[in-house]
Amino acid sequence: MTDEIVLTHALRTPFARAGTALRSVSAVELGRQVVTELIARSDIDPERVDEVVVGCAGSPAEASNIARVVALRADLPQSIPASTVQRNCGSGFDAITTAAERIRAGRATVVVAGAVESMSNYPLLFPESGRKQFTRIGGARSWGGKLVATAGLRPSHFRPRPAQRTGLTDPVSGLNMGETAEALAQEFGIKRERQDEFALRSHQRAVTAEAAGEFDDERVDIFLPDEAPGVVDLDLGPRSGQSLEALNDLRPIFDRRHGTVTAGNSCQLTDGAAATLVMSGSAASELGYEPLGRLAGYAWAGVDPRRMGLGPSYAIPAALEDAGRALDDMDRVEINEAFAAQVLAVQLCMRSRAFARDELGASAPLGEVPEEILNVNGGAIAIGHPVGATGMRLVATLLHSMQRNGLRHALASLCIGGGQGGAVVLER
């Protein structure tokens, strides 16, 4: 085990739709609470940690290197360096793989890898015309000059655009993430009914998993600020009363006339955080930890931004090759549910001979993921998608599921805004 990269502890916060229960908890505070709990539950000496790496897609302006702020707020020694990684939806994976690469390079033996996103607290962006006018006001040297500049303000200068919306629009293709899902639904002929059925299954599985206590070991309570005290201890997205009829009643939101992608068969934009202890096998032995699992392989892939949802179709075979495993070896598979249409398109690609030949240069398709091992505890459609934290949530869920059920191999993958895919293979 000496040369292995292992994950000994993995935790996450409850997930809540943006603007709801966790809206008063900053990204820093979400990260602080989950990292503090990680240190406490592992009972590791903080001085033994060599580095902190945190994934975040939208670091707040007041904590641009959010990893460093989280580390200090969690009372880790100030001598421990910290860095933030950003790979959009893949940021949580990137924190883990960056930690692994630090360890393999001999620059660390124990790394706290975190991931956090507070989509409730994304800022509003003023238009460029408004920014210029405010700059003129601020730059005026006299009160008279300020009054003249102020007189130039127009209503259009006060029409901010949510940073969330800007961040979820690809600057190269010009498509927002929902429009890329519509493109895949059209390309692969994925009907609205199939997408809604997939979404319903996500809710049903998440509700069943919650009732069975499947999330108890991976999830920590989040304490709300003093001005609105309370505790959030459950994921708030899964709906026990969800039905096909209710899903069918929702209108398409990205192509209102001809589309099939709705709020119901898309992921929920969410607040949440996660953290893991990543270390060398020798460090785990020295510290007396029995790892939850080891990082057997991983891969990143670039794809056409217009088809960004297909990222897993390219990353999964590369990750399996890196791990020396086949899809048939996997006991559990997680493919992040950015959109029902996107996961369904990935499944079609994975079993397509034409895709394998033309896109991967392979002689045979990767294979089919049995329904009974795919997203068994529900996915982002029900649980939510705090963009930068989701990858680490997938890993935490798989690690605890593998331990609980005595499983050996698992795979997690997700598509990444901007046209990428990421995948990791875990083993026990």
Image: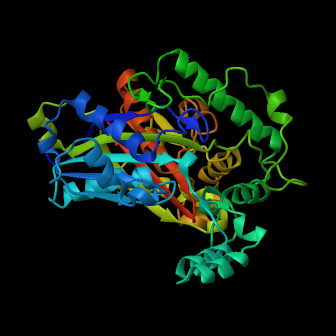
Q: Residue drawn 42% across and 40% down?
A: 30
Q: Quadrant of the N terminus?
A: top left
Instruction: Work out whether residue 205 or residue 312 is closer to the camera in this orientation and state it.
Output: 205
Instruction: Work out whether residue 140 or residue 264 is closer to the camera in this orientation and state it.
Output: 140
Left or right: residue 42 versus residue 259 is left
Q: Residue drawn 71% across and 65% down?
A: 158
- Asked whether residue 364 appears in the rendered view, the answer is no
Measured as percent of width and height from the top left, residue 343 is found at 63, 46
Q: Tally the numbered discs.
A: 0
Measured as percent of width and height from the top left, residue 404 is found at 38, 22
Q: Quadrant of the C terminus?
A: top left
Left or right: residue 176 versus residue 213 is right
Measured as percent of width and height from the top left, residue 294 is found at 29, 41
Left or right: residue 44 versus residue 377 is left
Instruction: Work out whether residue 383 or residue 353 is closer to the camera in this orientation and state it.
Output: 383
Q: Quadrant of residue 283?
A: top left
Q: Quadrant of residue 65?
A: bottom left
Left or right: residue 16 versus residue 226 is right
Q: Residue drawn 52% across and 34% down?
A: 15
- Asked whether residue 382 appears in the rendered view, the answer is yes
Image height check: is 300 above or below 234? below
Q: Residue furthest toward the top?
A: 212
Image height check: is 89 above or below 411? below
Q: Residue furthest toward the right?
A: 257
The type of colouring in the image is rainbow
Measured as percent of width and height from the top left, residue 160 is found at 68, 62
Instruction: Work out whether residue 313 or residue 302 is closer to the camera in this orientation and state it.
Output: 302
